[in-house]
């Protein structure tokens, strides 16, 4: 009988403790993206990426989209998104004809309930010329 009394007393003591305030999670949304194109001498390549994340009382949600295309001789493109809560993606596209080449590469990171970061690098090159390169970036964070 005494063992049952101690268990009930311990339960009563636990349930009468004051409830501590739970830390509040910031709520809001963030969206960002980047993209770029390169073209020279009958070759072209384009990639882009865009992501969004949101957080609220019910939890976090994220979305990420990637894509790319290339035109001209020997054109290739591919894109992928992977991850569960945090998403990572990349898209690559390239076209080349002997020494003439256009390529584009976009990478995005979507940290659920936190931030979205994207970066695109492009390059166009003709033989005997200096490559024309550019970079674009997009980022946003939930305050």
Image: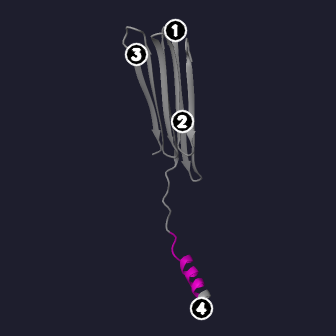
Tell me how far mark 1 sits from mark 2, CA to CA: 31 Å
89, above or below 123, in the image = below
The residue indicated by pointer 2 is 51
Q: Which mark is residue 132?
A: 3
Residue 138 visible, this angle: yes
Marks 4 and 3, the one that precedes in the sequence: 4
Which is nearer the eye, 80 or 17?
Answer: 80
Tell me how far mark 4 sits from mark 2, CA to CA: 61 Å
Local crowd at mark 4 within 10 Å, few (<14), some, or many (≥20)?
few
Marks 4 and 1, the one that precedes in the sequence: 4
Marks 1 and 2, the one that precedes in the sequence: 1
Local crowd at mark 3 within 10 Å, few (<14), some, or many (≥20)?
some
Q: What stretch is highlighted in magenta?
A: 5-19
Q: What is the x, y in percent for residue 44?
A: 52, 14
User: Are dots 4 and 1 in contact, CB under 8 Å?
Assistant: no
Quadrant of the drawing holding the C terminus = top left
The residue indicated by pointer 1 is 42
Residue 66 visible, this angle: no
Q: Is mark 4 on a helix, strand or loop?
A: helix
Q: What is the x, y in percent for residue 63?
A: 58, 39
In which image quadrant can residue 72 be found?
Answer: top right
* Secondary structure mainly formed by the magenta segment: helix
Q: Residue 2 carries which label?
A: 4
The answer to whether residue 42 is magenta is no
Which is nearer the eye, 116 or 128?
Answer: 128
The answer to whether residue 11 is magenta is yes
Task: Say which of marks 1 and 2 sits in front.
Answer: 1
In which image quadrant can residue 130 be found?
Answer: top left
User: Are dots 3 and 1 in contact, CB under 8 Å?
Assistant: no
Q: What is the x, y in percent for residue 22?
A: 50, 62
């Amino acid at each position: 009988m005494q063992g049952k009394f101690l268990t009930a007393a311990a339960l009563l003591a636990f349930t009468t403790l004051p409830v501590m305030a739970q830390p509040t999670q910031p709520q809001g949304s963030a969206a960002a993206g980047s993209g770029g194109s390169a073209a020279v001498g009958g070759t072209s390549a384009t990639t882009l990426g865009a992501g969004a994340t949101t957080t609220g009382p019910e939890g976090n949600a994220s979305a990420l989209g990637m894509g790319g295309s290339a035109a001209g001789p020997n054109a290739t493109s591919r894109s992928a998104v992977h991850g569960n809560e945090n998403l990572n993606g990349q898209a690559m596209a390239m076209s080349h004809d002997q020494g003439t080449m256009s390529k584009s590469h976009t990478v995005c990171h979507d940290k659920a309930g936190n931030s979205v970061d994207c970066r695109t690098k492009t390059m166009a090159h003709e033989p005997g010329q200096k490559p024309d390169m550019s970079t674009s970036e997009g980022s946003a964070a939930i305050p």
